[in-house]
Image (cartoon, rainbow, N blue to C red):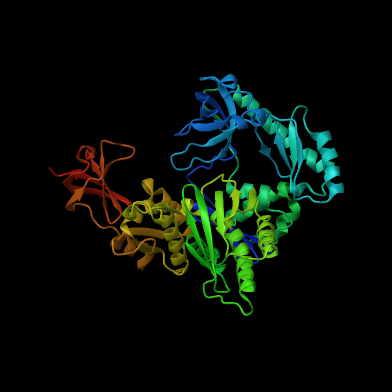
Amino acid sequence: MAKEFLINVSPSETRMAVLEDGKLVELSKESHTAQRHIGNIYRGKVENVLPGMQAAFIDIGMEKNAFLFIDDLHPETGDNGSASISDLLREGQEIIVQLVKEPMGNKGARVVTNLTIPGRYLVLMPTVDYIGISRRIEDEKERERLKKIALNLKPKGMGMIIRTAAEGLAEEELEADRNFLFNLWQKIVKRSKKGPTPALLFHDHDLLYRILRDLFTTEVDRLIIDDLSTYEKALDLLAFLGPHLRSKVQLFTGNSLFSIYGIEQQIEEALRRKIWLESGAYLVFDQTEALTVVDVNTGKYTGSTCLEDTVLHTNLAAAKEIARQIRLRNIGGIIVIDFIDMCDEENRKQVLDCLANELQKDKVKTNILGFTSLGLLEMTRKKTRPSLREQLQQPCTCCEGTGYKYSLDTQAARAERRIIELCADHPRDEALLIGVNTALAALLIGPGGNRLSALEKAVKKTVFIRGKEEIPSPEARIIAAGQRDYIQSLALPVKEGDRLEVDVIEPHLNNPVDGIARLEGYIIDIEDGGRFVGQRVKVKIQKMFKTYAKAVIED
């Protein structure tokens, strides 16, 4: 099986695609502005203890308090239920926790007290005395050798997990990783003893580092990166994370890496309710608050022999695609699959084994429970971060949440990538005037023009953004291209001395005394206009800038 990693970098986000035999199986993305929290270690304060739920709310400095179950506080109590959480925690108590599940919707983050600090070859567990060996290391002699090394290396009273990447390594290499993690833990302990509470004690690394540390192994055939600085950073990191892997890293210098490899199309398909199989059969995915249901249908596939063979072949193909879609869509929680009814018990087992084998490729823990008396297959998959749909889309207000559309942030990111492509198609032009939907113009410019500046730095051109209602989102169109002075004369919707009526839509972010109006995405900063929010006023343009103008109220 050919396995490839593709990393696409834009000014606003980094995306990583995992391909197996050319098919997209996983997608990760990380905004350059929004922080990721999984893996972070905090010194928190117990806000509420709930004996009836055997849980507590912990203030870790986020908008919503984090949730701590008793099983995640003292695993030994989870077996017999002999202890009450009120005996173990009290309100106002300070506690060190690690975030294992991001806040989702109206739910706060989930935290645990059993801390893990991952390295390239080892995972240090400072709070438990335990040794574990990765299940992906199957050779019993190698497992025994690594266990002996772990017993020798682990700090007293602490635990250690040997990761898959450690297979075949000498004790000296593992010891270096142990020393690094132990020194890191000592720094965390030192930070925990000073400063206010709540406090962030440890922040996990960015997406690139985590990919190289956790996922990039000898099983991966190549890692392709479309950004020079990210490519150079990857080589620098691999100098100590895995020098033998540096030859697998390649720089992509063409245009639109994800489009060329068909990633964008596969993302679109993964957001659809219906997925067609090559045979003509199809799958239907219905995600609810409680569970996800997958329905298998023969569709256009009629087979060539008997009905049972047709059903078996359809279910086997469906099992492979369902496993891929579960990984790609990042579906968590309870999953129910309605395969086409099979009379032969051996055929059922064959389908079950096929699904289990495909899910072994998934790094997220899954548990297949088997078929129910109604012929439905039940399984669960651990949920630690939002699904693909939750990451890229938002509920549609027009249908009161029964349907979904791309969020404005996702649409802006897509428009941004399209602008990069348009700039690449005009190598000789100094500047471009780009039209986008009015709802996206302000997002693409960003506060103080910072996002537009990052985009210009990436494309090495001057870019002007103009909002136009008639342009569908997230499309981006070239209105004009050429020399900078000429394009600037076309781009600015107003000029100094102009008098006009505008709607004051919000106070200025940094100076609430002033008010903000927008004209085709162009910002008009109105002096002393904050008191007129929600009203229409007459203003005079005083001074022009690239992304905004200063104005005063005429009356």
Q: Is residue 257 left or right of residue 506?
A: right
In the image, 244 versus 424, the foreground residue is 244
Residue 379 place in picture, x, y as percent: 60, 51
Residue 555 place in picture, x, y as percent: 12, 42
Regarding residue 90, the answer to whether it shows in the image is: yes
In the image, 431 versus 378, the foreground residue is 378
| Residue 365 to residue 435: above or below | above
Q: What residue appears at the point 82 percent right and 47 percent down from the top-left corner? A: 169
- Furthest residue in direction left, as rendered: 555
Q: What residue appears at the point 69 percent right and 63 percent down from the top-left corner? A: 350
Q: Quadrant of the N terminus?
A: bottom right
Q: Is residue 171 left or right of residue 236?
A: right
Regarding residue 225, the answer to whether it shows in the image is: no
| Count of picture labels | 0
| Residue 310 to residue 229: above or below | below
- Furthest residue in direction bottom, as rendered: 304
Residue 527 place in picture, x, y as percent: 23, 40
| Residue 139 to residue 258: above or below | above
In the image, 332 versus 149, the foreground residue is 332
Residue 68 place in picture, x, y as percent: 55, 31
Q: What residue appears at the point 49 percent right and 47 percent down from the top-left corner? A: 290
Quarter of the figure with residue 128? top right
In the image, 267 versus 458, the foreground residue is 267
